[in-house]
Image (cartoon, rainbow, N blue to C red):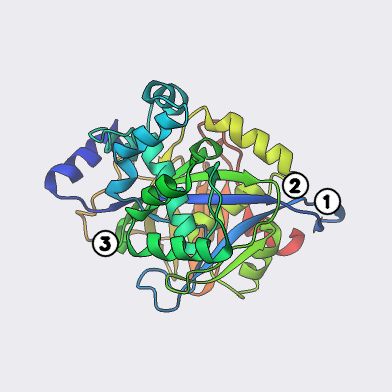
Amino acid sequence: MLIASFDLCAKMSGQVWKEAATLMLVGRALGSCMWGSQRASSDYKILFLKRSSRSTFMPKAYVFPGGVVEKTDFSSEWLKLFKNHGHSEEDLKSYFHCPEPRPSFYKNNDTHVLMAEVGFRIGAIRETFEECGLLLAKNCKFESVKSQDHWQKAVHKNDTQFLQMFLELGGCPDIWSLNQWQGWLTPTTFESRRFDTAFYIAFVDSIPTGRADNIEISHMQWIEPRAILRDYMNQKLWLPPPQLYELGRLLNFISFEKLKSFSEDRGRIGMDRWMPVIINSDQHVISVLPGDDLYPEEPDFLGQNKERLRIDMSTEESRTKSRKLHRLEMSGQSPSKLFMNIDPPFGHVRVANLGELILSKL
């Protein structure tokens, strides 16, 4: 109720963040990895995109595909398209309606003709296609690589072309393949560059090839969660906090099938949305999440208080004195340390305590 009330204020006073959708795309693969002293097979990789150095937001960061949702993602024309493929509006509402409590980005879009749970999925699929040419769709096939490149560029220039592509080529976006995962709201410290983002997870039975757009994205890579975390800890690349956190969750799974089964079952439960709160501590910064002892009872979602929160103790002392931990400890360019000892809501798995485990066991 608290988050919903703050979102209502945001809508009344002028939107202070953009709404976005992100796709964690998991591909079945063969291989192996080390986990401590035990050798375990790893049969999946996850898609990461490297943001262009020219990007105004998080340049050079390794991220999951995704971006801002557009009005056309919620167009009533999608209802006609889905109906032509045997999926009525009633079917969509029955299948995709998120159980209460629904995250705020779903509620904020209740005025659209197309339900938010469908529109955000379309946005995630469209952004993935724009950025790297990979399309999750039913009964839609490109005649050639040239045709695929043509549509990727067309959609990148004009988001309305995504619907037009299906009208010309047939088929529809495979929104059924996207499972709800987690919502993330950018902290208030970013001020004008904030995003309220729905994270989804989807699975493909092989590692497909794609093409980075070379505009927003400079490089695409399929990689095991442990491998990219190892590169992150060795400071070979940078991962934004939500990507780091979700990779910590994936460490619980070494099997494609088990991760897929878990994601499908858990996705039906619903989806939470978190806003990290930034707290200064000596020379470090602590990013606390809901459930942590330091997390405010009434978070400043709108960023009205310009004064940074601060505690007069070291990060280590704060961690030792806290009974409930759900935080990232950040220090300059050094890798963040992630700690969690509480049970997550909505049937999720705990994230690995990367601050204690990554360097010694990854």
- The disc placed on residue 191 is 3
Question: Horizontal and vertical percent for residue 21?
Answer: 41, 49
Contact check, label 1 and label 2, Cβ < 8 Å: yes
Which residue is label 2 attached to? 254
Nearer to me, 252 or 279: 252
**Secondary structure under badge 1?**
strand
Type of the residue with mark 3: Glu
Which residue is label 1 attached to? 41
The residue depicted at 55 percent of the width and 41 percent of the height is 139
Total count of labels: 3
Quadrant holding the N terminus: top left
Type of the residue with mark 1: Ser
**Secondary structure under badge 2?**
loop
Please tell me whether mark 3 or mark 2 is closer to you in this view. 2
Q: Do we see residue 43 in this rendering? A: yes
User: Dot 1: few (<14), some (14–19), or many (≥20) neighbours within 10 Å?
Assistant: some
Give the spatial CA distance, label 3 vs label 1: 43 Å
Question: Horizontal and vertical percent for residue 268?
Answer: 52, 28
Question: Horizontal and vertical percent for residue 263?
Answer: 60, 36
Tell me where residue 357 sits by quadrant. bottom right
Whichever of labels 1 and 2 marks the residue nearer the N terminus, that label is 1
**Left or right placement of residue 249 versus residue 200 in this view:** right
The residue depicted at 47 percent of the width and 25 percent of the height is 95
Whichever of labels 3 and 2 marks the residue nearer the N terminus, that label is 3
Above or below: residue 22 compared with residue 230: above
- Residue with the most extreme left position: 13
